[in-house]
Image: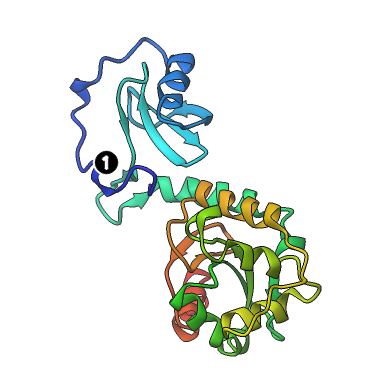
Amino acid sequence: MHFFGRTLLATAVAMTAFTAAAAPDDAAIKAKLGGLGLVPNSITPSPLAGLNEVVTDRGIMYVSDDGSYFIAGHLYKNDGAKPVNLTEQKMAKLNKDKLKGLESEMIVYPAKDEKYVVTVFTDTSCGYCRKLHNEMKAYNDAGITIRYLAFPRGGERSRNFSEMSAIWGAKDMAKAMDDAKNGHFDPSDIPQRPDVVRKHYQLGVAMGVSGTPAMILEDGTMLPGYQPAPMLRKMLDSRNGNS
């Protein structure tokens, strides 16, 4: 989870280090996470005794019953074969739900023969975002519809926050995005929509986006970074049993 950085990822947990209460103390957990600037949205038992799965506005954490200990990282189930990333599975479901109702705010580049829809958090100042955009025809020809949400990487402090606000305020948002990705966009005299860009950015943070482009598949799974169209199509086919 990017908010705390890689240094807090735990590779092993000594469960005896926890002084677990008889039952999760929701008030204590909320208070202690609140001291870190985190807002718990739900607190439920995890598969590990003494740890609770806490969904926050910055992702999923695993917290002791009294809130005194936490792990910011991924929880895996090891059945002796292929480990299952339980955190990723839960985040995918949450991500899918969070995207519902945002279709009217997305800049969409539809595939004529649509097989898959991929939502991309994009930044107009990002080199790999421009590379992805310049290859839009390849994605569409591969049957992949691309939908954009705004993610200026520094939030409102981003140098291009106002540019992206103007893109989402333009009458023809797709053309404005094309121009911006090619370095020819003039945001003057265009009403800005900072509210929309701020909303998208905050959503991305809540979904665990830490860089751009970040691709969200239809089931909510996140693919960080650029993926060439042929590779993305092959991966999508494989996930759907079409390989």
> In the picture shown, does residue 22 fall above or below 208?
above
Drawn side of residue 29 relative to residue 110, left or right: left
Residue 233 visible at all: no
Tell which of 138 and 121 is nearer to you: 121
Look at the numbered disc 1 and give the secondary structure of its residue. helix
Mark 1 surroundings within 10 Å by alpha-carbon count, few (fewer than 14), some (14 through 19), many (20 or more): some
Q: Position of residue 39 (x, y in %)?
A: 51, 31
Residue shown at the point (57%, 54%) measured from the top left: 201
Q: Which residue is mark 1?
A: 8
Residue at the front extreme of this rendering:
188
Total number of numbered labels? 1
Residue shown at the point (42%, 24%) measured from the top left: 35
Report the colour scheme.
Answer: rainbow
Residue at the top extreme of this rendering:
22
Residue shown at the point (39%, 44%) measured from the top left: 3
Residue 20 visible at all: yes
Q: Position of residue 2 (x, y in %)?
A: 38, 49
> In the picture shown, does residue 68 fall above or below 42?
above
Q: Position of residue 158 (x, y in %)?
A: 51, 60
Drawn side of residue 168 relative to residue 19, left or right: right
Dividing the picture into quadrants, the one containing residue 220 is bottom right
Residue shown at the point (40%, 36%) measured from the top left: 61
Residue at the right extreme of this rendering:
171
Mark 1 is on which residue type?
Answer: Leu
> In the picture shown, does residue 196 fall above or below 50?
below
Q: Position of residue 112 (x, y in %)?
A: 72, 86
Drawn side of residue 67 relative to residue 16, left or right: right
